[in-house]
Amino acid sequence: MEKRGSYRLASVAVILREFRKRQKKLTQAKVAERLDVCDTYIGSLEHGKVYPSIGMLVRIAEALEVRPGELLDAIVEREKAEQTTAAEQVQPPAKHKYTGPSRKKETN
């Protein structure tokens, strides 16, 4: 997914979907109705196809009946968790001590 500003669209999308489904048990159509937007717009937000403005995030928070700060905090926390996970997956190559060319002893 594309990165815009300091947060990836994936983080915003996942948090919006989680708040809508798990915390508020609302359909996309119901949220769209509360925002007076098309329900396909909500789907596009949740699939990371469009990036909401700060103003729209505030409106979405109001439609979900949460504080805008709560929604933004969740986005920030998810982004931090993803960055930590990504950093843990990147491991430096193992260091090998160079001992010079190998020499075989000749036996007679």
Image (cartoon, helix red, strand yellow):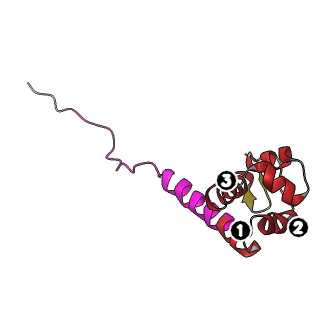
* Quadrant in which the N terminus appears: top right
Describe the element under mark 1 as helix, strand or loop.
Answer: helix
Q: State yes or no: residue 93 in magenta.
A: yes
Classify 10 Å Cα crowding around label 1: few (below 14), some (14-19), many (20 and above): many
**Image quadrant of residue 105?**
top left
Q: State yes or no: residue 83 in magenta.
A: yes
Q: Residue at x 67, y 53 (%)?
A: 14
Residue occupied by mark 1: 71
Q: Amino acid at mark 3?
A: Val
What span is colored magenta in the figure?
Answer: 75-104
Answer above or below: position of 10 versus 53.
above
In this image, 3 relative to 33: left or right? left
Tell me where residue 79 appears, x and y as whole percent: 64, 61
Tell me where residue 66 appears, x and y as whole percent: 72, 71
Residue occupied by mark 3: 14
Q: Residue at x 69, y 53 (%)?
A: 17
Q: Nearer the viewer, residue 93 or 51?
A: 51
Q: Amino acid at mark 1?
A: Leu
Q: Residue at x 33, y 43 (%)?
A: 100
Classify 10 Å Cα crowding around label 3: few (below 14), some (14-19), many (20 and above): some
Residue occupied by mark 2: 55
Describe the element under mark 3 as helix, strand or loop.
Answer: helix
Nearer-N-terminus badge (2/3): 3
**Image quadrant of residue 18?**
bottom right
Q: CA distance from mark 2 to mark 3?
A: 19 Å
